[in-house]
């Protein structure tokens, strides 16, 4: 069997050319942009001098949003294909953000190819660390959050999303992934759910335990809907989590 990390890399490299466009064409991605974008807006509302790390940022749509509001934005991802696609499609990214209600003068994004090893070597401090749909693909969640905590400036926060294991959609995905065939050309609808098999923890991400290990306290947890209207508003497959350095007693 192919190692999990290699499967992940191939999965995201293959999807890199179309990843940004999904935030315009895919209902789930549009909902993610709306909810996470609103949280980013709130986190950066009071300062123009913030430093932001978008870890696992992919093509960098949230990096671009942060760059409209922050002084320094670093988009780090281990997929060079994702980073390259984001750099090529900056105009499309700006248009998608404006259409979603996040208009603003474009800012500069520093794109870095790196994984947890690069993160461990970093010595900068950030006011906001983003990890959007990242932890489910990371085996060592406590180690990752410990690195985040080390990089947080005083008063800084971590914003992350993880699967909501109690969602009906996540339960269905787990069931579908377990029986999905390996030939996407014949069974594309089922095989599309096979990405669940590439998640180190599936929908059971141990983020609370990891946060406690890193001495990060939970500031807020919101259940994020799949779509904003109709029946889909009741299907909340993700959690949006805000973490801060635990106050000393």
Image (spheres, rainbow, N blue to C red):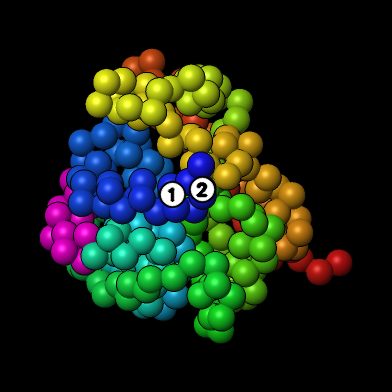
Q: Give the x, y percent position of residue 1.
A: 51, 42
Q: What stretch is highlighted in magenta?
A: 85-99
Contact, CB < 8 Å: mark 2 with mark 1? Answer: yes
Alpha-carbon span between mark 2 and mark 1: 6 Å
- Which residue: 27% across, 46% down? 15
User: How many marks can you see?
Assistant: 2
Where in the figure is residue 3, as x and y percent of width and height?
51, 49
- Tell me: residue 20, above or below residue 204: below
Q: Mark 1 points at which residue?
A: 8
Decide whether residue 94 is among the magenta residues.
yes
Tag 2, which secondary structure? helix
For residue 80, what is the image quadrant?
bottom left
Q: Badge 2 local density, few (<14 within 10 Å), some, or many (20+)?
A: some
Viewer-closest of 37 and 211: 211
Q: How crowded is mark 1: few (under 14 residues within 10 Å), some or many (20 or more)?
A: some
- The disc placed on residue 107 is none
Q: In this view, does 73 lie above or below 221?
A: below
Position of 31 with respect to 143 (left or right) is left
The secondary structure that most of the magenta stretch takes on is: helix
In the image, residue 195 lies at what x, y percent?
Answer: 43, 36
Q: Which residue is drawn at 81% across and 69% down?
A: 248
Q: Mark 2 points at which residue?
A: 4
Q: Residue at x 68, y 51 (%)?
A: 218
Task: Please report the residue visible at 62 percent of the width from the left and 69 percent of the height from the top.
Answer: 147
């Amino acid at each position: 069997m192919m190692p999990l990390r290699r499967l992940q890399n191939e999965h995201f490299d293959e999807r890199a050319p179309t990843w940004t466009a999904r935030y315009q064409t895919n209902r789930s991605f549009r909902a993610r942009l709306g909810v996470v974008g609103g949280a980013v807006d709130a986190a950066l509302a009071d300062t123009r001098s913030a430093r932001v790390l978008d870890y696992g940022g992919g093509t960098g749509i949230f990096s671009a949003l942060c760059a409209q509001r922050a002084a320094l934005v670093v988009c780090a991802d281990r997929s060079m294909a994702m980073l390259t696609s984001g750099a090529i499609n900056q105009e499309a990214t700006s248009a998608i953000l404006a259409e979603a209600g996040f208009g603003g003068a474009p800012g500069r994004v520093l794109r870095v190819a790196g994984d947890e090893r690069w993160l461990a070597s970093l010595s900068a401090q950030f006011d906001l660390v983003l990890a959007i749909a990242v932890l489910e693909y990371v085996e060592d969640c406590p180690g990752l959050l410990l690195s985040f905590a080390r990089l947080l400036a005083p008063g800084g926060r971590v914003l992350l999303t993880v699967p909501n294991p109690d969602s009906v959609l996540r339960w269905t995905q787990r069931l579908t992934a377990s029986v999905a065939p390996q030939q996407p050309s014949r069974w594309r609808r089922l095989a599309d759910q096979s990405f669940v098999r590439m998640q180190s923890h599936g929908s059971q991400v141990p983020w609370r335990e990891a946060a406690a290990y890193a001495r990060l306290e939970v500031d807020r947890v919101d259940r994020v809907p799949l779509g904003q209207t109709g029946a889909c508003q009741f299907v909340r497959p993700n959690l949006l989590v805000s973490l801060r350095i635990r106050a000393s007693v």
